[in-house]
Image (cartoon, rainbow, N blue to C red):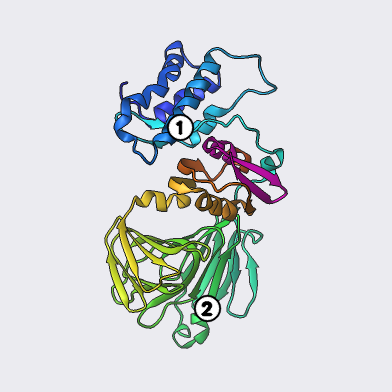
Amino acid sequence: MKEIHKQHFIAILEKYRLDQATAEEISFLETYYNVFDLNEDLITADNEQYFSDLKARIRLQVEEEINPKPSPLFRSSWFRYAAAAMVVLSLSIGAYFYLQSPQPVADSASTIYPGSNKAVLTLADGKKIVLDDAANGAIGEFPGISISKTANGELIYTVIESDQTENDNSSTALHTISTPRAGQYQVVLPDGTHVWLNAATSLSYPSSFKGNSRTVNLKGEAYFEVAKNKNMPFIIKSGVQTVEVLGTHFNVNAYENEQDIRTTLIEGAVKVSVNGSQSVLAPGQQARVSYSQPGKINVQNVDFNKEIAWKNGVFAFEADDLQTVMRQIERWYNVDVTYSGKPCEEKFYGEISRNDKLSDVFKILEINNVHFEVKGKTINVTCN
């Protein structure tokens, strides 16, 4: 098979969905499942059964599309789901994709929509400003700073120079921005540091950085692009862990219902400290601090694109277990998850847009032999 660019492949899928594909493009889709025969070196003992099952489903779907049975009430939209879930396996091959599961997803899941730009700003005096309800533009002006909100979900602090700022204690008052489940937001701090907050996250920070450091407190997950200042290191405290930087890009996942705190470096250098232990990360490295064993820092090389996929509007899975996947679903769709039946040993691979409705996400995930029952905002999960 000649080399296929991912975006070109997606374009073919979309043309087929719209009944605009040429005979050559239809033939390509008919034989596409052979990608797995050509790439057996990519299949390991850990994922052999997964790819075997996936290939069988692709073959069945192709045969059904080429030799259709009597039309159902609505046409399958599996190609759109496939494109959304695609993961590149090899530059010489292209990608593999998930198909729509033949098992129906409860209609009520189609009414559960993804998260959006939502947050609350809490000022030093306890006053709360619901940012998604506030008008765009200026939110307030305080000694030494002004705060404004943009239309794309961003809170911006701007330093105002004045003679009285230097001696005004209120200019270092503590502010907190918090996102709920199904919320996300961005904030530009007074020093110019840009922070992206994931769902169910809070960041506390002084309204003006003074002294020898710039210290903030994080609960949840955030991506940082720290403004450089060699004389005033930027310090993030999250649980038992402290991260110190001078100016760099990195992600911190410090959700309390995860097994560990994960700090992933994209650019520059950071120092991770916990209980007297320290590790300096290089780009592409991740430090893990276990909640159950907080005295040890485990450092490993990772694909940082997966770690920051949420910031780019994507769920990214790479051999993730069901519970890990569903914790992300809980936070982003503001649902509660329960489990019944036998434990699920399936591993999940691929990418899914965080802009999809929950029902669309489930149609992709159900390729892995799991079933979702939706009752209101509660999801019960069983493995087939």
How many numbered marks, from 0 up? Answer: 2
Residue drawn 65% across the image and 48% down it: 380
Residue 191 appears in which quarter of the rendering?
A: bottom left
Which residue position holds label 2?
174
Three-letter amino acid code at disc 1?
Answer: Phe
- Image-based side of 134 in relation to 152, left or right: right
Q: Nearer the viewer, mark 2 or mark 1?
A: 1
Q: Earlier in the sequence, mark 2 or mark 1?
A: 1
Q: Marks 2 and 1: CB-CB under 8 Å?
A: no
Q: For label 2, count other residues whose C-alpha is less than 10 Å away and answer few (under 14), some (14-19) or many (20+).
A: some
Whether residue 233 appears in this view of the structure is yes
**Which span is picked out in magenta?**
361-384
Q: Which mark is residue 97?
A: 1
Q: Is residue 281 above or below residue 333?
A: below
Check the image and name the residue furthest to the bottom.
167
Three-letter amino acid code at disc 2?
Answer: Leu
Residue drawn 67% across the image and 40% down it: 110
Whether residue 152 appears in this view of the structure is no
Q: For label 1, count other residues whose C-alpha is less than 10 Å away and answer few (under 14), some (14-19) or many (20+).
A: many
Residue 138 appears in which quarter of the rendering?
A: bottom right
Q: Position of residue 44 (x, y in %)?
A: 34, 38
Q: Position of residue 246 (x, y in %)?
A: 31, 70
Residue 227 appears in which quarter of the rendering?
A: bottom left
Q: Quadrant of the N terminus?
A: top left
Residue 178 covered by magenta stretch: no
Residue drawn 62% across the image and 14% down it: 69
Q: Give the structural element (helix, strand or loop) at label 1.
A: loop
Q: Give the structural element (helix, strand or loop) at label 2.
A: strand
Q: Position of residue 282 (x, y in %)?
A: 26, 60
Residue sitting nearer the eye, 363 or 148: 363
Q: Is residue 91 above or below residue 355?
A: above
